[in-house]
């Protein structure tokens, strides 16, 4: 039996990665989708585990050959994307693929896979709370936080394109709601 696709998207700081890491420990037959990129490997990264590291030329060839489910040129000549072969490898093995992906990528995957994909939007309780979380993380400069908050406001407006919206005002509750939605979808 083929696996299904689980898409989790959220503004930065909404708790998406924390929720995904918790879900991967539960018995849902989830396998994380490994993205492709054309940047060099960083210290400690492993090809085909952290990313599929490919050259710019190869990335562009794969774009032209329609080999991506979704892709984005994040900065000039800096590409990231999800290979169709990666998705097919996971679902053909009977596992369910889980995506930790930006809003546009999530919407594109949902449009492509339709009923075989569940698109979940992790919503922060408020934009103010999201800003507090980003500040408390202490990983970004104040200017970057302001940019992320502005982007989050735009992303929240796109949440209606998702099958399910889960408000993360309590992490355990959000994990349980996400788990229940996935369980219902894959059964």
Image: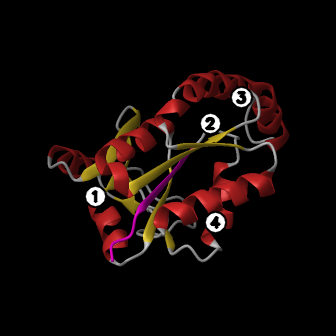
Question: Circles 3 and 1: CB distance less than 8 Å?
Answer: no
Toward which corner of the image does residue 48 lie, by quadrant?
bottom left
Q: Between tags 4 and 2, which lies in front?
A: 4
Q: Residue 113: where, in percent of width, then height?
A: 32, 51
* Residue stretch rendered in magenta on the structure: 1-9
Question: Circles 2 and 1: CB distance less than 8 Å?
Answer: no
Residue nearer the viewer, 74 or 125: 125
Q: Which residue is mark 2?
A: 11
Q: Residue at x 69, y 65 (%)?
A: 22
N-term-proximal mark, 3 vs 2: 2
Q: Which residue is mark 4?
A: 23
Q: Between tags 4 and 1, which lies in front?
A: 4
Q: What is the spatial separation of the Cα atoms under label 3 and label 1, in whole angstroms?
A: 33 Å
Is 65 on the left or on the right of 110, as rendered? left
Q: Between tags 3 and 1, which lies in front?
A: 1
Q: Which residue is mark 3?
A: 145
Is 128 on the left or on the right of 166, as rendered? right
Q: Is residue 165 magenta?
A: no
Q: Is 78 drawn above or below residue 41 in the view shown?
A: above
N-term-proximal mark, 4 vs 2: 2
Is 79 on the left or on the right of 11, as rendered? left
Q: Residues within 10 Å of mark 2 (few under 14, many from 20)?
A: many
């Amino acid at each position: 039996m083929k696996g299904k696709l689980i898409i989790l998207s959220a503004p930065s700081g909404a708790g998406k990665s924390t929720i995904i890491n918790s879900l991967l420990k539960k018995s849902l037959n989830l396998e994380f989708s490994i993205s492709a990129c054309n940047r060099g490997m960083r210290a400690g990264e492993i090809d085909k585990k952290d990313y599929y590291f490919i050259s710019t030329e190869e990335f562009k060839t794969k774009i032209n050959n329609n080999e991506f489910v979704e892709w984005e040129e994040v900065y000039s000549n800096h590409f990231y994307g999800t290979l169709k072969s990666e998705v097919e490898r996971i679902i053909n093995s009977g596992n369910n693929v889980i995506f930790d992906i930006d809003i546009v990528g999530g919407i594109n995957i949902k449009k492509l896979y339709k009923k075989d994909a569940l698109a979940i939007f992790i919503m922060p309780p408020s934009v103010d709370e999201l800003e507090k979380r980003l500040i408390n993380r202490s990983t970004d400069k104040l200017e970057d936080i302001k940019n992320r908050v502005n982007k989050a406001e735009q992303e929240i407006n796109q949440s209606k394109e998702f099958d399910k919206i889960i408000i993360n005002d309590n992490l355990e509750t959000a994990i349980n709601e996400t788990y229940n939605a996935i369980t219902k979808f894959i059964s």
